[in-house]
Image (cartoon, grey):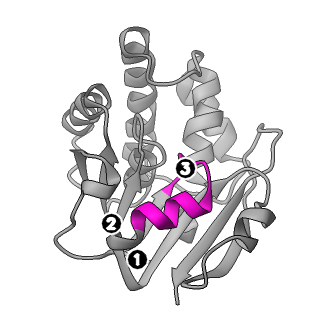
Amino acid sequence: MIRNKLDALLAKTSISLSETQKQQLVSYVEMLDKWNKAYNLTSVRDPQEMVVKHILDSLVVAPHLDGNHYIDVGTGPGLPGVVLAIAHPDKQFVLLDSLGKRIRFLNQVKLNLKLKNITPVQSRVEEYQPEQPFDGVLSRAFASLQDMVDWCQHLVDHSGRFIALKGQFPEQEIDQLPASIEYQDKVVLTVPELDAERHLIILKKN
């Protein structure tokens, strides 16, 4: 059933995935559904709904990732990081979260799905020090763009990007960004069967 839903939704996009990638996404939803009962990882309870609100909502970001080394800050149960890692087996993703139960889940996901390109890390974002700057900071968890750049500045250098997954276009938040941060671009995303606005906001250091 999950696979049928995934196939039907993918058919409404231009995203092309291999058989292995589709199976990994199905397995991820099954794990999320199973662990959710005990760990309360997401408020979405129905696996069919998870395919729309979590899998496709993350997958539509995949065509817009240029770099090779990303960090998903406040990843929760791995959104969008796990989904993007499945879509881009050639890119590396650090999945950062401060809650141990989420990191335990992600380590199990890494094992079960044989994902060699994710590194789950338990840490608060302001305390995490990367060995090298990331090509991009991803997040769909931050309350505001201001918080994102405040807490994540040390994770990228001038060539890196802040990539925020947002609902409605956050015009006011962009207006309030500090002079040290440049608003670079927005991408309007379309998620099949999701009746809500989705934007990707891309920022960089000046």
User: The magenta stretch spans which residues?
Assistant: 139-152
Which x, y percent locates residue 95?
32, 49
Left or right, 53 with respect to 27, comes to: right
Q: Seen from this angle, which residue lies furthest top?
A: 37
Which x, y percent locates residue 206?
52, 90
Q: Badge 2 is on which residue?
A: 91
Label 3 – label 1 distance at C-alpha:
21 Å
Of the numbered discs in the image, which one, if any, rests on residue 190? none
Query: Is residue 200 within the magenta segment?
Result: no
In front: 70, or 124? 124
Label 2 – label 3 distance at C-alpha:
23 Å
Q: Badge 3 is on which residue?
A: 142
Q: Is residue 61 visible?
A: no
Q: Sort mark 3 into few (<14), some (14-19) or many (20+) by Cα contacts within 10 Å.
A: some
Q: Sort mark 2 into few (<14), some (14-19) or many (20+) by Cα contacts within 10 Å.
A: some
Left or right, 83 with respect to 176, comes to: left
Which x, y percent locates residue 192?
75, 43
Q: Badge 1 is on which residue?
A: 67
Residue, x 54% and y 84% (percent of image)?
180
Residue, x 77% and y 38% (percent of image)?
194
Q: Is residue 82 visible?
A: yes
Mark toward the start of the polypeptide (2 vs 3): 2
Mark toward the start of the polypeptide (3 vs 1): 1
State whether residue 182 is above or below residue 77.
below
Q: Are marks 1 and 2 in contact (CB under 8 Å)?
A: yes
Q: Sort mark 1 into few (<14), some (14-19) or many (20+) by Cα contacts within 10 Å.
A: some
